Structure formats: structure tokens, C-alpha cells
């Protein structure tokens, strides 16, 4: 059983040394024999065992215990190694699929993120659309996309939460996903509604007509503005304005700087959550008690294309 | 024995405790020099070329033959590449037409046993196997019960490579002689460690290797009486100097030993082996034997005091070999552990004597410490201490 561990260890060491490469081949021979139900006759296991016992011989009782239970201990270590491989593969898949090795919605430490410097970082500016009590001392940040169904799912709960928690101020930063049609235009339209003090109302319309916007485009955004009671002339001018577009891009860049890899992403006091929460979850999140549920992928978040994922 | 300075291997590896002498031995400088001189000063062909270098090679080669023959008290020597080839030569080329019975033992080395088993399976001979006691001790009466008038050959070791035990060779030869059978002695383990005189023993052949007696690898000998070697059939390896004359109609074979030495020989090996014989003669083979036995007894005594160690063979070692196991641990693990502990190079396994080890009840083999003239008491004590550590963990 020790040959399984030896194969991996020597294969890695073999990258750097020809001596270990030979051991790796020997271990592979042994492993191949084992998995084809033949006896491993290379003697590698005996050499490893003897070497280990020799090193442990200064603690005779421990050496004796290890010797007597060598096969069992080898089995345990082999299973642990296999489990760690499975978890590492799962982490790698998560990182590839969601940009975070811990899976959708997690902000826990990810070794790949640490390697690539992609740990989620709370934004440093209060720029954005303020929701709830604008003078509330608890500041909750959200990066959201109006064409993202997960941002939509988060919206009602967030609204209700802010209504019942006057100490909370939400700073909403549009993060239009480039792979969603008209996401940037929808963000621009929402900022234009904010200019007229009707962001929340217009956002309701955007989320309610999210699917249609993909086909309806700008004309539909304009129709929705009328429905929301916005001044059409001002709205249209704002929507055409380069300044509005620049503002949206600035928020997007801020999201990239925060290593946002999906919407919605929430930040509070350095902690973060990727994916929608229910109304009750926000209180837990602010209290630092929120545990990310094991949600299926289709209940996770909207991810941008990998090339824009900071 | 104060000989360690003669061995470059020991000078170059001061931490080495070399206890694998039954496998091969270290070489004294005189042997290395003898070989080197051949290559550097007179590297020619013997028996073919008439130039000075060729003549010097031939003289040195034939001198080596005489010296080695004298060392084992034999009338002639056929050079082979090792003892295995010498054993095979006799077994393959003995005629079993009139007498087809061969008597041998379960403790023989594979080199003797395998050719016999092959011939038995081909129905070319009938094989009778003699078994020793569970301590590996043979009784001459067991041979007497198996040797009869149909016996063509008795194949027996002079010293077991797995246990170091020595069968009653003189009596066995007498029994074979009485029945008119020839005797082939496997002397691979005995010639290096004890005085050998084939003529006095009365046996027909004795096979041994150079490298187990301080000589080079690649050289072995079949020492024989002239009569015995003449009785062997035409060579299984023909060529070069093996003939007197040859035409497309007829071959006239050369007289032995040349008949059995096809092609260019291992001149350097033969010359080196003669130097090894010289070295052992100077050091006195009787003293070497006593030294080996004394050290083996010291080790056996030390190992017996360790709980969990099982010794094989008789109570008092009959030669410089001690064979043992520790608990149920694999022999290889024990040997490797001890090597890492005290630097002792040991042999572990079934020692190319699988049927013998099965007979002794240790089918997975054992660990063997085999000693020689350069080993010391301090080495033995360090070795025993290391085995004690192994037993504390593995027994």
C-alpha cells in the first residue's frame, strides 16, 4: 500500500532529480502489479519500511507500533491522499467554473486565489447607489447585474431588509456582466433613474422584465422608464451620455479590483458572500453568522467570462 | 587477522561491515594488481600466438592453472566463468546411458539442482534426494541408503551456502566409490574457507568460483582428476582451441582441459585467481577457517541472547556463516534495517536454495551473515547490537 504514496511522492521529487525518477518508475511497477492483483516483488515497500523503521528506532515503542500496524497506517495515508486528490480536483474544477475553489457563493480562503491574488477584497469607496438609510452606520456593499437572475433573486430580500433595518446602508455598485446582452445599458438606465430619485422603482421594473430586456434592448429600457414614471427626455439624454457610461465602467472596474467573479457579491466589514441571500440571511451575514448553503450550481451566481475575471 | 589494509574496498569504505562473503568477497590489492598487470603489461592470447606477448600470456595462464590446481589438490583445472558453469558442465556431459541414477541433496544451490531437475524431467536420469535433519545436518547413512549400483553421479556440496553446514564428505565419497559412482562436489563455499585436497578426498570433481575466494568475478574452475574429466562427453561449448584437428569429415577433440575451454579465455581472471590463491596460502587457509568460525560463534552466541531471534543450523557454527530471522519480519526488512543501523552488508532471501529453505521451514528465506578473514570482533558486536534493535521493533 505504501507504493501508492511512494509513487506520488517520488513522481513529484522526480521532477527535480533523476534518482527519484527511478524510484517513481519502481513505485509505478509496484502499483501496477497491485492494481492488476499481482504481488509487488520490487522490494520497494520493504526498503521504505526498513528505512522508516531505522529512522524511528530512536523511539522504540513508536517504531514498534508503526511496524506492527504498517499496512493499516499505509492504507489510512493512502486513503487520505486519495481524498485530498479528490478535493483538490474539486477545488480546481470550482476555480475553473466559478473562479473560487470553494464553490459557488463562497468567500472562504482559496489557495488558487491566493496564488493568483484573486481573494475577494471589499471596495474602498462609498461610490454607488445608496439604498436604505443613507446615514446608516452599517455599510453593506453589493455588486449586482440587472440582467443576472441571481441579482434579481437577491433584490426583494435586500429591499425588505433595508426597510426593517434603519441602521443599514446599502451601497449598490452595478457590475454589468459582459456576457449578458444589454447588461451595461440596463446599468446605465438604472443610474439614470437614480438621477431622478427613482432607482428602486426602476430596478423593480428591470428585474421584473429581465428576460425581455435581452430581446427588447434599449427601446424596452425606455418604455420601462416611462412606466416607472421617469422623465423621458432627461432619461434618454442620460442614457446617451458618455458620462453615464463612464460611471458604469468605473463601477465595473471597481468590481474587478475587488476580484468579483460573480453577481451578486456582497461585502460587509471585510467578509463577503457570492450569490443571493434571503431576507433573513442578511442579518446573519452582518452578524458574521451566515453559512453559505451547499447550493446547486444553477442556484449560485452569474459569472462573467473568465477573461474579465480580475 | 590484520589484513584490512590489504583491501582497497575497506580503505575506501571505512564504515562498511561486509558480511556477504558467501555471495562474493572483497579483493586484496595483490589480486587487483595481478589483473591490472596483465592488461597493462602483457595483454595477449594464450595457446595461439607465437609472439612474446602471447607466450607470456600463455605462461602466466598455465602457471595460474597449476597454482590453482595445487591449491585444491587437483590433477587438472578446467576454467569456466563460475562455479555454476563448472557444475553444469559435469551434469550436462556425464553419460547416463549405463547408469542413470544421480544422488543429491535438498540443500544444493540452484546451480547444481536445476540442471539435475531439468534432466530428471526429461527422463534422462533418476534423481534421488537426500534430506538433512531440520538443523541442516546430514547423516552419511542417508546417502548409503540412496546410492546403489545404478548411481552414476553423486552431487553434493562441501559447505551449504544457506546454513554453512558441512556434510560428512569423506564418508559420502567412500559410499559413492564403493558403488562405482563419480562424485561432483560443489565447493563454491568451502574452497575459499577451508583447506581442500581433491585427491585426498577421493572425489572426481570440485567446482568453485574465483570471486568467492578473493579472486576476480567471471572466473570459475572445475578441478578434477584426469580420469574423471576425460570421461566427460564432447564439450557443450565448442570452438577455438577445443580440437586437435578438424575436417569436414571428422573432429579430433583436444585433451582436457583445453577440450572444454572454447574461445579466448578469461586470462586476467585466471591470473587474478592464482594471486588470490597465493594470498590465501600466505595467510594460511587453516587460520582463515578458524578465524571465520570464531567470529560466527561470537555472532551466534550474541544472537541467541536476543529475544525473538531464530537461528538456523547446528548449535555451533560449522563455518563462518550464521543464518537467522527476527520474529515474523521479512528477511529483507531485517537486512535493510541492520544495514542502516550499523552499515553491515547482509544477504537476505532464499540464497538460491529455495527447495532447501522450504525444507527447513522458512520458505520466505532468512538473513545470512557470512564472514571472512578481514572481518573483526568489533564488527560482529556492532552487528549483534543492531539486530537487537531490529528485534525490539520487529519481533
Image: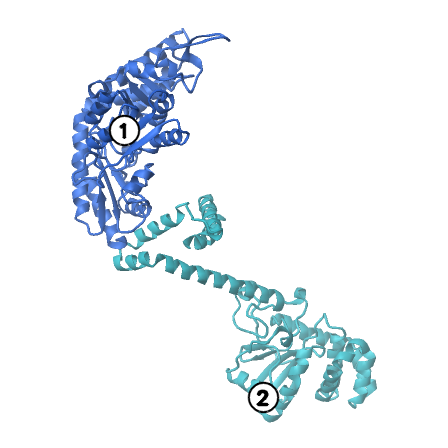
Shown colour of chain A: cyan
Of A140 and A274, the residue lying toward us? A274
Q: Which mark is residue B182?
A: none
Residue B193 picture quarter: top left
For the colour blue, the matching chain is B
Q: Which residue is mark 2?
A: A168
Residue A172 picture quarter: bottom right
For mark 2, name the chain.
A
Disc number lying in front (1 or 2)? 1
Q: Which residue is mark 1?
A: B156
Residue B146 picture quarter: top left
Residue, x 69% and y 78% (percent of image)? A149
A27, above or below B57, in the image: below
Residue, x 29% and y 57% (percent of image)? A63
**Residue B240 shown left or right of residue B223 in the figure:** right
B1, above or below A124, in the image: above
Disc 2 packing (10 Å; few <14; some 14–19; many ≥20): many
Of B370 and B113, the residue lying toward us? B113
The answer to whether residue B384 is seen in the rendering is yes
Residue B202 percent across, percent down from the top left: 22, 20
Of A137 and A102, the residue lying toward us? A102
Amino acid at each position: 500500500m505504501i507504493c501508492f504514496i511512494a509513487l506520488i511522492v517520488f513522481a513529484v521529487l522526480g521532477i527535480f532529480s533523476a534518482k527519484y525518477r527511478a524510484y517513481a518508475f519502481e513505485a509505478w511497477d509496484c502499483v501496477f502489479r497491485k492494481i492488476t492483483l499481482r504481488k509487488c516483488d520490487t522490494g520497494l515497500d520493504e526498503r521504505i519500511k526498513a528505512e522508516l523503521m531505522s529512522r524511528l528506532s530512536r523511539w522504540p515503542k513508536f517504531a514498534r507500533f508503526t511496524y506492527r500496524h504498517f499496512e493499516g497506517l499505509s492504507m489510512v495515508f493512502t486513503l487520505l491522499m486519495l481524498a485530498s486528490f479528490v478535493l483538490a480536483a474539486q477545488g480546481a474544477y470550482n476555480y475553473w467554473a466559478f473562479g473560487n475553489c470553494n464553490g459557488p457563493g463562497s468567500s472562504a480562503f482559496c489557495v488558487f486565489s491566493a496564488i493568483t491574488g484573486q481573494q475577494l477584497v471589499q471596495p474602498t469607496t462609498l461610490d454607488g447607489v445608496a439604498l436604505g438609510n443613507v446615514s446608516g452606520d452599517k455599510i453593506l456593499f453589493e455588486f449586482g447585474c440587472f440582467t443576472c437572475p441571481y441579482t434579481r433573486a437577491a433584490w426583494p430580500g435586500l429591499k425588505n431588509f433595508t426597510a426593517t433595518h434603519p441602521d443599514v446602508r446599502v451601497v449598490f455598485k452595478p457590475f454589468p456582466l459582459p456576457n449578458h446582452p444589454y447588461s451595461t445599458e440596463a446599468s446605465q438606465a438604472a443610474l439614470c433613474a437614480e438621477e431622478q430619485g427613482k432607482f428602486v422603482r426602476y430596478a423593480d421594473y428591470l428585474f421584473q422584465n429581465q428576460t425581455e430586456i435581452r430581446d427588447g434592448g434599449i427601446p424596452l429600457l425606455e418604455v420601462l422608464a416611462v412606466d416607472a414614471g421617469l422623465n423621458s427626455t432627461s432619461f434618454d439624454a442620460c442614457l446617451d451620455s458618455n458620462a453615464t457610461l463612464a460611471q458604469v465602467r468605473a463601477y465595473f472596474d471597481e468590481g474587478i479590483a475587488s476580484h468579483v467573479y460573480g453577481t451578486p457579491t456582497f461585502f460587509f466589514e471585510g467578509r463577503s458572500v457570492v450569490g443571493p441571500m434571503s431576507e433573513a440571511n442578511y442579518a446573519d451575514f452582518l452578524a458574521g453568522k451566515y453559512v453559505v448553503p451547499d447550493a446547486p450550481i444553477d442556484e449560485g451566481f452569474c459569472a462573467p467570462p473568465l477573461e474579465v475575471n480580475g | 587477522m590484520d589484513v584490512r589494509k590489504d583491501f582497497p574496498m575497506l580503505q575506501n569504505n571505512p564504515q562498511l561491515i561486509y558480511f556477504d562473503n558467501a555471495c562474493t568477497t572483497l579483493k586484496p590489492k595483490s589480486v587487483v594488481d595481478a589483473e591490472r598487470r596483465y592488461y597493462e603489461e602483457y595483454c595477449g592470447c594464450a595457446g595461439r600466438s607465437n609472439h612474446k606477448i602471447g607466450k607470456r600470456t600463455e605462461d602466466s595462464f598455465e602457471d595460474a592453472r597449476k597454482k590453482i590446481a595445487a591449491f585444491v589438490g587437483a590433477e587438472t583445472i578446467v576454467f569456466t566463468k563460475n562455479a555454476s558453469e563448472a557444475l553444469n558442465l559435469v551434469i550436462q556431459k556425464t553419460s547416463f546411458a549405463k547408469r542413470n541414477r544421480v544422488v543429491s541433496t535438498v540443500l544444493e544451490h540452484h546451480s547444481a539442482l536445476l540442471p539435475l531437475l531439468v534432466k530428471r524431467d526429461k527422463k534422462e536420469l533418476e534423481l534421488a534426494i537426500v534430506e538433512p535433519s531440520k538443523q541442516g545436518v546430514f547423516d552419511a547413512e542417508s546417502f548409503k541408503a540412496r546410492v546403489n549400483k545404478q548411481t552414476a553421479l553423486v552431487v553434493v556440496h562441501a559447505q551449504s551456502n544457506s546454513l554453512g553446514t558441512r556434510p560428512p564428505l569423506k564418508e559420502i565419497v567412500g559410499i559413492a566409490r564403493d558403488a562405482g559412482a563419480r562424485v561432483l562436489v560443489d565447493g563454491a563455499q568451502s574452497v575459499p574457507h577451508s583447506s581442500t585436497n581433491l585427491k585426498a578426498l577421493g572425489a572426481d570433481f570440485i567446482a568453485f568460483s574465483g570471486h568467492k575466494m578473493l579472486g576476480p568475478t567471471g572466473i570459475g574452475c572445475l578441478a578434477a582428476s584426469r580420469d574423471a574429466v576425460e570421461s566427460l562427453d564432447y564439450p557443450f561449448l565448442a570452438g577455438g582451441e577445443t580440437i586437435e584437428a578438424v575436417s569436414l569429415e571428422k573432429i579430433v577433440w583436444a585433451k582436457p582441459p583445453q577440450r572444454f575451454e572454447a574461445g579466448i579465455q578469461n586470462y586476467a581472471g585466471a591470473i587474478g585467481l592464482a594471486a588470490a590463491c597465493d594470498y590465501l596460502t600466505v595467510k594460511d587457509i587453516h587460520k582463515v577457517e578458524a578465524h571465520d568460525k570464531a567470529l560466527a560463534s561470537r555472532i551466534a552466541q550474541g544472537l541467541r541472547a536476543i529475544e525473538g531471534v531464530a537461528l538456523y543450523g547446528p548449535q555451533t557454527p560449522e563455518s563462518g556463516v550464521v543464518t537467522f530471522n527476527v520474529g515474523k519480519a521479512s528477511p529483507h526488512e531485517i537486512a535493510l534495517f541492520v544495514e542502516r543501523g550499523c552499515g553491515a552488508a547482509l544477504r537476505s532471501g532464499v540464497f538460491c536454495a529455495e527447495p532447501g529453505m522450504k525444507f527447513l521451514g522458512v520458505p520466505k528465506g532468512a538473513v545470512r551473515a557470512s564472514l571472512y578473514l578481514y572481518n573483526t570482533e568489533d564488527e560482529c558486536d556492532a552487528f549483534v547490537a543492531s539486530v537487537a534493535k531490529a528485534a525490539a521493533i520487529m519481533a
